[in-house]
Amino acid sequence: MKDTRLIQKLEPRGLRLAPSQVWGRLRLVPVLRDVVRDDLRLSRRRYGEDLSVVTLEGALKGRGLAYVTYIPHGLVVDWSPRQADATYGTRLQAQDGKRTKAGPGSVRLLHRMVHREDKHQLRMLPLHLAMEGFLALHFGGPDIAWSEYSREALARGLSPRSEQAVPGWSEPLLDGALRTFELHERQVGLLLFNADELLSAFIVAHPDDYRLLHRTLLEDFYGELLLQFGFLTEAPPLGLSIDDARVANLEDLKAEVSRMRADWGDFHAFMAGGLFGVEVTSRKVYEAGPFLLQRFHTSLVPSEENHLGEAIVGPDGALEYLKTFRLSSAQTRRAYLLQQLAASDWALDEAAEVMRTTRDDLLVRLHNAGFGYLVKPNVLAEARRSMGRAR
Amino acid sequence: MSPTREVRIEQVAREDLVMFVNACFSCTGQREFYGDARGQTVSIEFLHQYILGNYRRLYRRTLAAGINHFNQAQILLNLLAAGSPVDAEDRREEGALIAAALRGLPTQRAFRVLESLRSRRINNRRARAVAREYVAGRSHLPFDAVKYRSKLRATAAHCHLKLPGETGPFLFHGWKKRVFVEPLLESFRQAHFSQGALYGLPFTVAEGLASRHGVPRDVFLQRIEPRLTQAERLRLQESAAREGGVEPPVDLARAPLTKLASYALSLDVETRRARRAELHAALERSAARVLARAPSALGRVAVVLDNSYSASGSSQKRRRPLAVALAAHYLLEGAAREFRAFWTSPVEEPLLATARGQSDLATPLLEALSWGADLVVIVSDGYDNDPPGAVAELTRVYRAKLDPARRTALVHVNPVFDAEEYSPRAFGLAVPTVGVRDAEDLPTVLGFARFAEGTATLRELEQYLAARVAPWLERDAGLRSRAAEEGEA
């Protein structure tokens, strides 16, 4: 039976958007939660290493699939019913993985993306969880040994597959934006816009946790859009005005100001329309008591805004935790190609027909997307020659 | 010249001057919450040069307008660099203003101005005369020679001053060469060789020598305690407790209002709660003292105070905007017949205020307006973000539709200088914005607010500045003659 807590469509139920605060071209939109539940708390665990290796299969030091990246911090999720303050401080020093030296740097070996540490506690690697899910999309390569595919593709699939992201601190503006941002009393999250394009969303369950995690946004990674729009200068100061004609006394004025505030929320919800309200494909990752940890991605159609992320949903289906990553267009293209190939069992002709294009074009697109190594070199060369002739 | 053109010229002049005086109330060239120190300095230097070049008479008269020390020092230096005016009357007035302003500055700032003469290569006859007069007017020169050693030496060398008594040899021949008769100079010499002599020196001088002798901090603080000045005591409260020493007893009743508010806010909330009665009484007394000096009787006053996160200031101006808000609370409460305060995020008690949360100024402002105040004072850094621009819109509509007759006066007091706009940030055109550094300046600043609003003419502004010159010079003369009498007695 399908779990009803799996997200079909991201809906910010119980959440409100407050007016944004602008710093240069970054627009930060606070997310407020009116009803706060006390039984899901998050805290940060710092890792100081230059590189982290997360084993996805097998033992910590054994052979098997691994995810290699820079991880500055992890999140500790705690859902014991009478938890509260115990997590903070006391368990932060818990042994987590192993630390080894590697030349001039240090490496942390971590076991699994999500690791149960106690009866009511688990450690997860935020955003990496979603990213790893994305990298593992159709990772195994073709299931049927079609003659076009290279020996490497048949034997090892897409391994190793890599994607690039931009760390928050590579954009100096973000530091200023987070420093000068004024947190609301009930704030549990933040939508981050760059030149009015939604870059990421971060939502937690409790306002106190958000206050502590606010600065970690600088250590997170973002889609390439964070740097791409460097030439655009400022997010425009959007002015909403009060209509003189509708004001006859102070009560009216009060009503108009609250209307102004509500208008801001609606406006931001509209701007975040590429994430909230669209259909998503989600997969269960971990069942933590009444909570369900899952990762998801949007349609992956290249013409649309695409996000991937992870979420924790409560027993009543409310969104308790959310962290998203905006895919760049190149990343979306790659994902789309893999998806189409997998959907037609990696048969090139069939996939080309579904995509309403020719087989040669599909091969060239695969090559351009960086997946040229999947196909035999002579097949690819033939396709490029014929495409060249056609042009 | 056509009349419209003349009107326009006058308008530009007035706007320039209002912007300048306003900047001189708030800018200190230090880091702010939203802006860095470099931008502040560039911005204020440009403004000074611009006004000096175009409106020299008004530029020097600004010295008497109650502006902050940082800008007074800037004006002094710029005037000395520019050379004397040709007109004899102008020269006399400028000379008197410079001398009085220099005497009015805190000693370290005055010596800093004189020392800057050297680094800026200003050495005209007037600059030398000003330095000579200032040094001659110091009541206890050996003390200055010990405490401001390098600055006094630089001034004396640069301006060819003859220093009386042993001060000259002390500064120029090296203090190691001889034994001094003057006890302070002798202590300074001895303190280099014995720990015992440390405690006859001013605190700031002894501090460095103590660490060279390796005197433990708590022992040093305990023994130097009788030599501490009021400001030093207040400043040392926090660090003394941290170093494990005993906090030097401080006479809260004598501390200036904004400094006191700053001190109260530096304590954690629990301590503030425990010492509530004591702090509250001290703040009230301090406010009363300000009002006794500059009495202002106000009617029904509402004050809207910003305690959002940006009121926490910067590393150079820690909690400054919040301290100004708290001090303004006590000051206006003392001056008003009826008083109410509205914070952006409500506090149970003004003393327990912390800088937290977003800037929702619209809600408290609406409450203040519906309470029906005669005067609404907004103390804020000029950023409102919940919703953005709400105050500008709200006040515009309020002025246009609900209160065209201006029964309620609105003033925005801003402790933060915005480098990009060359002035404190404003909330639209319906509310005049004035800069302020210390809450003590509020009576002055409120008087200036009608110029910021833009309804007064240039002539009125000129008269306002001119009218402040004479009493200010008189007060300086009074202080001088009293000091001279004390010196003789």
Image (tube, rainbow, N blue to C red):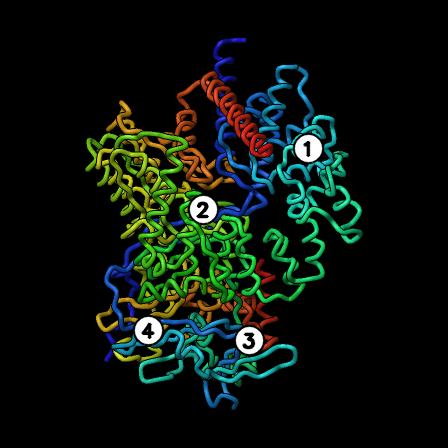
Q: Identify which residue is drawn at 38% across, 33% down.
A: B292
Q: CA distance from mark 4 to mark 2?
A: 37 Å
Q: CA distance from mark 2 to mark 1?
A: 30 Å
Q: Position of residue B8 (x, y in %)?
A: 49, 17
The chain holding disc 4 is A
* Mark 4 on the same chain as mark 2: no
Q: Which residue is mark 2?
A: B259
Badge 4 amino acid = Asp
Badge 2 amino acid = Lys
Q: Which residue is mark 3?
A: A49
Q: CA distance from mark 4 to mark 3?
A: 28 Å
| Mark toward the start of the polypeptide (2 vs 1) | 1
Q: Secondary structure at mark 4?
A: loop
Question: Would you call the spot at circle 2 few (<14 residues within 10 Å), some (14-19), or many (20 or more)?
Answer: some
| Mark toward the start of the polypeptide (4 vs 3) | 3
User: Disc 4 vs disc 3: Cβ atoms closer than 8 Å?
Assistant: no
